[in-house]
Amino acid sequence: MQTRSPIFDDLADIMTSAAGAAAGAGEEIKSIFRAQADRFIADMDLVSREEFETLKVMTQQLYDDNQALRAEIDALKKASKKTAVPKTRARKTKT
């Protein structure tokens, strides 16, 4: 009497092969999808995180410089108003 059936052994081998093929196909699909996504993102011309952070710092520095220059201009305007000599009207003389 046989303890193992060759039909069940063959069926188990087929199922194992099918599972391996399905797993391989799944990995292949993931790889293709990832490549397509990478290509799509590259075509969008996005900036990297490093570039973004660099521009963010530069923009903040420019904003701070701009604010300092505005304050300096305002101070100069106030100082010039205090020292400005009022203009006198020249009188017209009849000749």
Image (cartoon, rainbow, N blue to C red):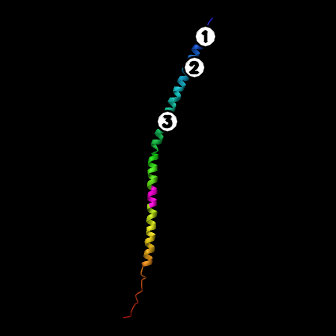
Q: Which residue is mark 1?
A: 5
> Whole-Å distance between the Cαs marked 1 and 3?
43 Å
- The residue at the point 44 percent across, 77 percent down is 81
Q: Which residue is mark 2?
A: 15
Side of 16 relative to 53 (left or right): right
Q: Quadrant of the C terminus?
A: bottom left
The answer to which of marks 3 and 2 sits earlier in the sequence is: 2
> Whole-Å distance between the Cαs marked 3 and 2?
28 Å
* Amino acid at dot 3: Arg
Q: Position of residue 19 (x, y in %)?
A: 56, 23
The answer to which of marks 1 and 3 sits earlier in the sequence is: 1
Q: Are marks 2 and 1 in contact (CB under 8 Å)?
A: no
- The residue at the point 44 percent across, 58 percent down is 62
Residue 63 falls within the magenta-colored stretch? yes
Disc 2 element: helix
- The residue at the point 53 percent across, 23 percent down is 20
Say few, some or many: other residues with alpha carbon within 10 Å of mark 2 (under 14 / 14 to 19 / 20 or more). few
The answer to which of marks 2 and 1 sits earlier in the sequence is: 1
Q: Which mark is residue 34?
A: 3
Q: Residue furthest right?
A: 1
Side of 48 relative to 16 (left or right): left
* Amino acid at dot 2: Met
Q: Are marks 3 and 2 in contact (CB under 8 Å)?
A: no
Q: What span is in magenta?
A: 59-64
Side of 91 relative to 21 (left or right): left
Q: Position of residue 66 (x, y in %)?
A: 44, 62
